[in-house]
């Protein structure tokens, strides 16, 4: 096995809706504004409101069911759910570090690795304030130098229309098969997992995280096969349903969601391995609801919340005591069987990788 075996819908927030209000009207609406995402943090604190982030579709459905709704019921707090993409949330956290608009952003692994290198933006997490970290697989805490903690993980492998391919793919190299010209889907930067694609291309062509040149050359050769570099994770659904796309690199749970709707889709972990993707919690250093933020993260990491979310969305829990059952247990591989990319080694190259991807691969 190579290396070590380890969406975007935007909503206009309430503050934007109130920009045209006069000062008197705005003061009259202060209670509502205080609970809004863009409201001053002190007003949100008075209202016991916390802003977090996440993705639409199944992720949102089960995050609300497993975490947000029971936490609101238990604490009386209000959770504001902000849509978008991890890069946007990190940018917001940097730009608004003194008065954070997001108290607990949930970041995807590559973005998270940048986030933990930034001083003065996020807290170093105190395990005493998050007792459930004691039950979190150390790889999902130590990876972030304890400046973040994993919430869930998923595997990034090969999906395909099982009625269109003569045989199931078995290797990442199968994406380069000329039989797939104009039928392949790959993520673009805003959809996530682009860095994983670059690393995979390098690894299967003799390179490494420290030597990506074989990957760049291979990706240029792959371009004739690519139907589309999708911008968000809802784009592929219709393309696979209509069989315009027949093979691609994607996360398992998203593939299974299409399969469960009746589309003949298959999913495999290639023999070289599937990178593990992780969503992690970060707490804004200057949040005015620090106690609530710690309480929220601890709740989300509880055995009960992790089991509910994991079994619902069919992604892996980071709490080792959480148990997957039935179909989820069959579909989610143990984290220690997945490919672990050397993110610290990759981190200094990320900005250049993204620029080169846009310039040489997508263009």
Image (tube, grey):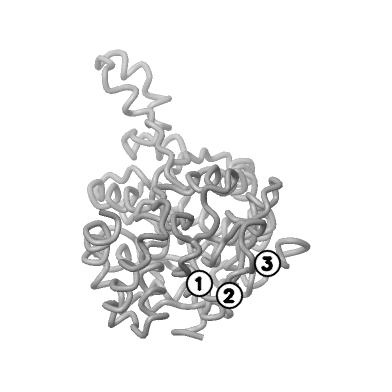
CB under 8 Å between discs 1 and 2: yes
Residue 256, placed above or below residue 43: below
Which of labels 1 and 3 is toward the front?
1
Q: Which mark is residue 174?
A: 1
Q: Earlier in the sequence, mark 1 or mark 3?
A: 1
Q: Earlier in the sequence, mark 2 or mark 3?
A: 2
Residue 352, horizontal then vertical, whole percent: 21, 66
> Does the rendering let one see residue 181?
yes
Q: Residue at x 36, y 51 (%)?
A: 190
Residue 147, horizontal then vertical, whole percent: 38, 67
Say few, some or many: other residues with alpha carbon within 10 Å of mark 3 (under 14 / 14 to 19 / 20 or more): many
Q: Residue at x 34, y 49 (%)?
A: 89
> Does the rendering let one see residue 104?
no
Q: Quick one: 110 or 194, which is closer to the camera? A: 194
Which of labels 2 and 3 is toward the front?
2
- Could you give the CA–CA distance between mark 1 and mark 2, rounded to whole angstroms? 7 Å
List the single residue furthest toward the right. 326
Q: Which residue is mark 3?
A: 322
> In the drawing, does residue 271 fall left or right of residue 230?
right
Q: Quick one: 58 or 352, which is closer to the camera? A: 352
- Could you give the CA–CA distance between mark 2 and mark 3, rounded to whole angstroms? 30 Å
């Amino acid at each position: 096995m190579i290396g070590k075996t380890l969406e975007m819908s935007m909503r206009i927030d309430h503050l934007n809706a109130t920009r045209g209000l006069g000062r008197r009207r705005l003061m009259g609406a202060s209670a509502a504004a205080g609970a809004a995402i863009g409201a001053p943090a002190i007003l949100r604190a008075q209202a016991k409101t916390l802003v977090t982030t996440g993705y639409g579709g199944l992720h949102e459905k089960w995050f609300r069911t497993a975490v947000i709704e029971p936490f609101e019921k238990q604490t009386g707090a209000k959770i504001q759910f902000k849509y978008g993409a991890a890069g946007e949330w990190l940018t917001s956290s940097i730009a608004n570090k003194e008065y954070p608009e997001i108290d607990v952003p949930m970041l995807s692994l590559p973005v998270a690795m940048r986030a933990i290198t930034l001083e003065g933006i996020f807290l170093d997490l105190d395990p005493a304030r998050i007792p459930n970290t004691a039950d979190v697989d150390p790889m999902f805490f130590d990876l972030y130098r304890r400046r973040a903690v994993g919430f869930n993980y998923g595997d990034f492998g090969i999906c395909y229309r099982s009625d269109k391919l003569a045989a199931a793919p078995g290797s990442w190299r199968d994406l380069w098969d000329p039989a797939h010209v104009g039928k392949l889907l790959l993520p673009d930067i805003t959809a996530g997992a682009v860095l994983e694609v670059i690393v995979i291309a390098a690894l299967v062509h003799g390179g490494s995280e420290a030597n990506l040149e074989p990957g760049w050359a291979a990706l240029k050769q792959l371009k004739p096969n690519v139907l589309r570099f999708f911008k968000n994770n809802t784009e592929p659904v219709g393309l696979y349903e209509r069989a315009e796309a027949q093979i691609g690199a994607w996360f398992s749970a998203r593939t299974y969601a299409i399969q469960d709707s009746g589309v003949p889709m298959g999913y495999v972990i290639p023999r070289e391995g599937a990178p593990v993707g992780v969503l992690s919690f970060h707490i804004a250093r200057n949040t005015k609801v620090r106690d609530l933020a710690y309480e929220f993260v601890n709740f989300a990491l509880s055995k009960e919340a992790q089991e509910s979310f994991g079994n619902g969305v069919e992604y892996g829990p980071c709490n080792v005591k959480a148990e997957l059952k039935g179909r989820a247990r069959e579909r989610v591989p143990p984290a220690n069987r997945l490919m672990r990319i050397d993110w610290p080694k990759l981190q200094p190259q990320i900005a250049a990788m993204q620029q080169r991807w846009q310039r040489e691969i997508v263009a």
